[in-house]
Image: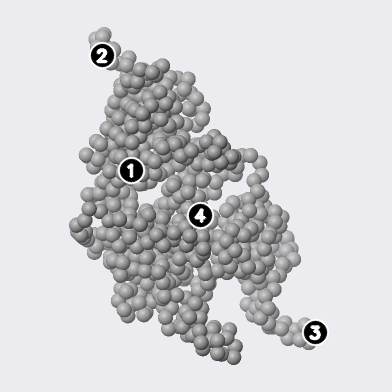
Amino acid sequence: MKVRVQVDGQLYEVEIGDLNSRPIQAMVDGELFAVWPEEVAGVVATLPPVQEDPMADVGARQQPFAAPASGDQVETMTSPLPGDILVVAVRAGEKVEAGQLLCTIESMKMNNPVRSPRAGVVEEVFVAVGDHVNYGQPLVRLR
Amino acid sequence: MSTDDPRILGLRKRRAQALEAGGAGRIARQHAKGKGTARERLALLFDANTFQELGMLATARCADADEHFAGDGVVVGFGLIHRRTVFAYAQDATVFGGALGEMHGRKICQVMDRAVESGAPIIGLIDSGGARIQEGVYGLGGYAEIFRRNALYSGIVPQISLLLGPCAGGAAYSPALTDLLVMVEGQSYMFLTGPEVIRAVTGEEVNAEQLGGARMHISTSGLAHFVTQTEQHAIALARRLLGYLPSNHLENPLLSAPGVELPNAGEILNSIVPLDPRQPYSMHAVIEHVVDAHSFLEVQERFARNAIVGLARLAGQPVGIIAQEPEVLAGALDIDASDKITRFVRFCDAFNIPLVTFVDTPGFLPGIDQEYHGIIRHGAKIVYAYSTATVPKLSVVTRKAYGGAYVVMSSKQLGADVTLAWPSAEIAVMGGEGAAAILYRKEIAAAPDPNVARARYAEEYRERYLNPYTAAEGGFIDEVIEPRETRARLIGALIALRQKAIVPLARRHGNMPA
């Protein structure tokens, strides 16, 4: 979505990415910004549920392993391949479902999604949009 | 039937004793762990009342053992699964913990021999503490006899291993030699050297589950092909798997009633590949919308997820599916993916299962680690497997097919019978940026703005080469088709190629890279 915004008399050309991803990416005159919108609970709740696309999500197709019996388990998701962080889709403290997008790494000429292997809570996010990551570099810690 | 003939009564008593196996106490303990006995498991595996036992009264002859049990810790025999003969052995954890002794080994070998002579699959239900120490080398010899048969019978009849308990030490080689290996979460584990030995030698602390449990082998080592929640699920899966397989290498897999495609499959396929080549899509979804609805049974689902292998049906005909998953590692081929693809291609080829390959790969995964660990010899195995496979080979290029990865993934020149491509296919030596950087190095360097020049040359290259038409003009792609036509095209080709017969050149055997 492209919009023109006028601020203090100055006209900016803004290209806004997927509104469902977090952060929302906005390109302002060639510079990339990550935007965390204020989430208004009431409004979000009245939106129609996201159309379940049975084919959209590989991760969700797999039967996740049962949660380990022995309390909380901490797990650090690491980068499967070297590249640049394009999207960080979660924040520390956020609950995630199995198969939910954690971040996207631009590599091998592809925007590679990194998905949560299980349901849990994000304890820490180690990367920001634009960071370069290498094989095995920590991305997100899940609990 | 009542009788007072002492000979018949004597037999009844011996049989009743044999059925008690390790005794009520040990059976209760097995049940308490949520595990069945060998005979209970076999009853689930076979069609009702079709299992016939062999060697129920065989007993260890080792004089050192304190106790002797009829059957010697393993139940073997044959029966029907979906009305086809299958031979099986089930280790009995209530007798010496399922440990393998001489007679135990001989019983397994005999059932393997009979299976091969009669061209029927072998299923092993494994639950064993290892070699019976009291029997020494006689037990070890039993393992060797089983392993040798696993190897010699490989590719003659399907061999399936269900790991329903421990399988430690050298015993683990037998399942590893079989075609398909199913583990049960939290119940089965496999390793060569156990946690105690590892602690003593390397000082590493690890428990049996972490070291060789189902989760490890399904996702990390790639040894297990399937993991199930319970042993009942594992047994049901074995029955389902046989439905995709012939009884032996001389037969074709059974055709089932032609299935139908998922609703709106054509429309979904026509819009599945995003216009932006950087956006991934789900190759799983492609597969599921091409094959008979709900027929896709993925193998090694959690190992090397950048590659997909699995069994499916097209109009009732079993096929082996090989593909890349652009959502994982961009679909690049690496060492593990190469191993996974190779083993599956050879498995299908051994049992007359046609190969259907969906290609979307940017190439082999770059990296020092991959090169040091021998990506060349692992990748070479894919070439070897596809080149030597004589079953019908069909391929569909959905998007990227670059360089060496294009060559190895069932290309026309490697012997694919029918090669199809979607209009979104990009068949070329490499992608746009890389090609531009090499082909126009001087021009880019001399340009006032090298970045602009590079982008322009990349775009030129993309328009000229990154399409299926150059390959189609050269005859490397037989047909460029709309995605929605894929299912009908594949089914047509499978019917046409059903009688395909290739006589390989005479040789002792090939020498596949390892």
> Residue A18 at what x, y percent from top left?
62, 70
> Residue B114 at what x, y percent from top left?
24, 36
Q: Indicate left or right for B355 with B127 as reference.
A: left
Instruction: Specify the quadrant that holds the N terminus of chain B.
Output: top left
User: Within 10 Å of the Cα at label 2, are there few (<14), some (14-19), or many (20+) other Cα atoms?
Assistant: few
The residue to which callout 3 is attached is A8
Q: Nearer the viewer, residue A82 or B247?
A: A82
The residue to which callout 1 is attached is B159
Q: Which mark is residue B3?
A: none
Instruction: Say which element carries label 1.
Output: strand
Residues at discs 1 and 4 in contact (Cβ within 8 Å) = no
Regarding residue B263, the answer to whether it shows in the image is no
| Mark closer to the chain start, 1 or 2 | 2
Are callouts 3 and 1 both on one chain? no
Tag in front: 1 or 4:
1
Q: Chain of mark 4?
A: A
The residue to which callout 2 is attached is B8
Residue pictured at 21% horizontal, 56% vertical = B507
Q: Amino acid at mark 3?
A: Asp
Q: Nearer the viewer, residue B173 or A48?
A: B173
Residue pictured at 45% horizontal, 68% vertical = B363
How far separated are the C-alphas under marks 4 and 3?
A: 49 Å
Q: Amino acid at mark 2?
A: Ile
Instruction: Say which element carries label 3.
Output: loop
How far separated are the C-alphas under marks 1 and 4?
A: 28 Å
> Residue B198 at what x, y percent from top left?
54, 39
Instruction: Say which element carries label 2.
Output: helix
Q: Is residue A137 above or below residue A30?
A: above
Q: Is residue B437 above or below residue B174?
A: below
Q: Chain of mark 2?
A: B
The residue to which callout 4 is attached is A61
Q: Amino acid at mark 4?
A: Arg
